[in-house]
């Protein structure tokens, strides 16, 4: 969803990494719950703006 939204704004995806993936994140509870603080599943994307 993030890649689609940013691509629609005119940016092109360049790289992505799963470096911050946490397989223990249940993905169905609020990220604001105290027991999940600091252990949520995260991602990093790199985009470029076309010339």
Image (spheres, rainbow, N blue to C red):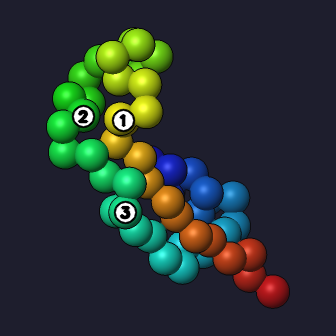
- Sequence-first tag of 2 and 1: 2
As helix, strand or loop, the secondary structure at mark 1 comes to loop
Residues 15 and 41: in front is: 41
Which residue is identified by label 1? 40
Local packing at callout 2 (Cα closer than 10 Å; few below 14, some 14-19, many 20+) is some
Of all residues shown, which one is farthest toward the right? Answer: 51
Instruction: Using the image, determine if residue 17 lies above or below residue 6.
Output: below
Coordinates of residue 35 in the picture (x, y in percent): 33, 16
Do residues under tags 3 and 1 come within 8 Å of each other at their CB atoms?
A: no
Q: Nearer the viewer, residue 9 or 33?
A: 33
Q: Quadrant of residue 37?
A: top left
- Whether tag 2 and tag 1 are in contact, CB under 8 A, the answer is yes
**27 lies left or right of 33:** left
Measure the alpha-carbon separation of dots 2 and 3: 14 Å
- The CA distance from mark 2 to mark 1 is 5 Å
Residue tagged 2:
25
Residue 45 in the image, given as x and y percentages of width and height: 52, 64
Above or below, comparing residue 33 to residue 4 in the picture: above
Q: In the displayed image of the protein, which residue is found farthest to the bottom?
A: 51
> Which residue is at a point 59% across and 63% down the rendered structure image?
7
Asked which secondary structure carries label 3, the reply is loop
Rendering coords of residue 3 (x, y %): 49, 58
Q: Are marks 2 and 3 in contact (CB under 8 Å)?
A: no
Identify the residue shown where x is 27% and y is 46%. Answer: 22
Q: Which residue is mark 3?
A: 19
Numbered disc 2: secondary structure: loop
């Amino acid at each position: 969803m993030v890649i689609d939204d940013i691509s629609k704004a005119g940016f092109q995806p360049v790289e992505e990494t799963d470096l911050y993936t946490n397989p223990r994140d249940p993905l169905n509870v609020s990220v604001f719950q105290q027991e999940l603080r600091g252990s949520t599943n995260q991602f990093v994307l790199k985009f470029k703006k076309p010339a």
